[in-house]
Image (cartoon, helix red, strand yellow):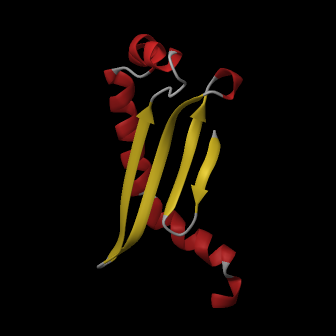
């Protein structure tokens, strides 16, 4: 993995394959919303290397990211984001001890 953006609005990273070739990306975006925070997550499995990327996507993507894998990933993300409200206050308090 290689972090591509980490700030107050987004945490995104590339998924790296053999030789450091990007094989996809994961994006998490968040923003204040009435009564809390909005959260958006996106996973893209795609090799963008010219010429060979198209072939690898056609052949390897279905093998590496099947429907079962997608279902598991959706369940994982739902569980992970569903626990954010329990974890985030403790992390914030630890990072900002002067606010206690």
| Relative height, residue 19 to residue 1 (above, below) | above
User: Residue 16: horizontal and vertical position, in percent?
Assistant: 62, 31
Residue 39 visible in the snapshot: yes
In which quadrant will I find the C terminus?
bottom right
Residue farthest toward the front in the current orientation of the protein: 51
Residue 100 visible in the snapshot: no
On screen, residue 3 versus residue 31, left or right, reads right
User: Residue 18: horizontal and vertical position, in percent?
Assistant: 66, 21
Q: Quadrant of residue 6?
A: bottom right
* Residue at the image point whose x is 53% and y is 69% from the top: 8
On screen, residue 10 versus residue 81, left or right, reads right
Q: Quadrant of residue 37?
A: bottom left
Front-most of 31 and 48? 48
Front-most of 100 and 23? 23
User: Residue 64: horizontal and vertical position, in percent?
Assistant: 46, 18
User: Residue 25: horizontal and vertical position, in percent?
Assistant: 50, 39
In which quadrant will I find the N terminus?
top right
* Residue at the image point whose x is 57% and y is 45% from the top: 13
* Residue at the image point whose x is 52% and y is 22% from the top: 50
Front-most of 94 and 40? 40
On screen, residue 72 versus residue 47, left or right, reads left
Residue farthest toward the left in the current orientation of the protein: 34
| Relative height, residue 25 to residue 41 (above, below) | above
């Amino acid at each position: 993995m290689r972090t591509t953006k980490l700030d107050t609005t987004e945490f995104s990273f590339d998924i790296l394959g053999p030789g450091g070739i990007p094989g996809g990306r994961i994006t998490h975006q968040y923003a204040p919303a009435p009564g809390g925070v909005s959260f958006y997550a996106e996973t893209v499995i795609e090799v963008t290397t010219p010429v060979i990327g198209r072939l690898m996507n056609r052949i390897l993507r279905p093998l590496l990211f099947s429907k079962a894998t997608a279902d598991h990933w959706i369940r994982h993300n739902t569980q992970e984001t569903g626990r954010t409200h329990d974890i985030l206050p403790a992390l914030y308090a630890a990072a900002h001890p002067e606010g206690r």
